[in-house]
Amino acid sequence: MSLTTRWTMACSFALLMCGQVMAQGIYTCIDGKGRKITSDRPIAECMDRAQKEISPAGTVKRVLAPPPTPQERAALEEKEKAEAEARSRAAEEKLRDRALMTRYPDRASHDKERALALEVVNDTLKTATKRSEDLAVQRKSITTELEFYKSSPGKAPPALKRRLDETDGNIAAQKRLLADQEAEKKRITQRFELEAAKLKPQWDVAGPSSTAAAAGGAKKP
């Protein structure tokens, strides 16, 4: 191989390597000592700080960020965890909405179940109210009997006193039951109102045809 040929090959190889470096771009940064460093690959001395990759045209192609600190990494993990939980909640909510629409394809079916749920509570309230009234009459009768021993309470029969205590206890229990049922009635009302507000857009899209279809299906034997 002649000297000229070897020289030509060497120049071609050098130009090829230079072209690859230029195509890849160069990296530059300021290290911890304030020195500007340039290289054809990511710079080890600047792994703890940002470094830029410069294109052959002299523009910044990208900035290589330093690895996060433990505090930044913890914050990032917490953010990712919160985002994952939010996505999970959204997916669960979507599934619940779908199941809700399957259960109540129209307003009529929803209103019917709401009425049934409130009917159970109202029946309990009616029974508890009647029981409270009966206990009030019973207590009045006992206190009337105790009036005979007003001047000497110590002579009142123990059984009469026990009846009064038991009646007072039953009255208190009925008051708690009435309060619980009123709260349950309020909870049911709020639940069905929220469901109706959520389902209304889907009911509107389905239109009256879904109601007719549901009614027709209910008539089949």
Image (spheres, rainbow, N blue to C red):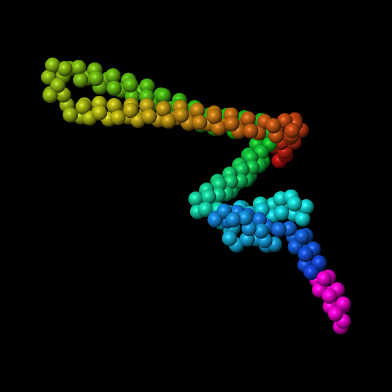
Q: Is residue 166 left or right of residue 174?
A: left
Quadrant of the drawing holding the N terminus:
bottom right
Q: Which residues are magenta?
A: 1-13
- What residue is rendered at 20% in x and 29% in y? 159
Q: Quadrant of residue 165?
A: top left
- Residue at figure coordinates x 85%, y 80% from the top left: 3
Give the tally of numbered discs.
0
Q: Is residue 110 visible?
A: no
Answer with the quarter of the image where residue 24 lies: bottom right
Left or right: residue 32 versus residue 160 is right
Report x, y in % for residue 185.
50, 29
Q: Residue at x 50, y 28 (%)?
A: 186
Front residue (pair 210, 9)? 9
Residue 8 shown in magenta: yes
Residue 23 at x, y percent in the picture: 77, 60
Residue 31 in view here? yes
**Is residue 137 placed above or below 57 in the rendered structure?**
above
The C terminus - image quarter: top right
Q: Residue furthest front?
A: 3
Whether residue 110 is in magenta: the answer is: no
Q: Nearer the viewer, residue 170 or 5?
A: 5
- Furthest-bottom residue in this view: 1
Is residue 95 depicted above or below 107 in this figure? below
Residue 170 percent across, percent down from the top left: 32, 29
Dominant SS in magenta: helix
Give 113 or 58, whichever is nearer the viewer: 58
Please give the name of the residue rendered at 32% of the width and 20% of the height, measured from the top-left corner.
137
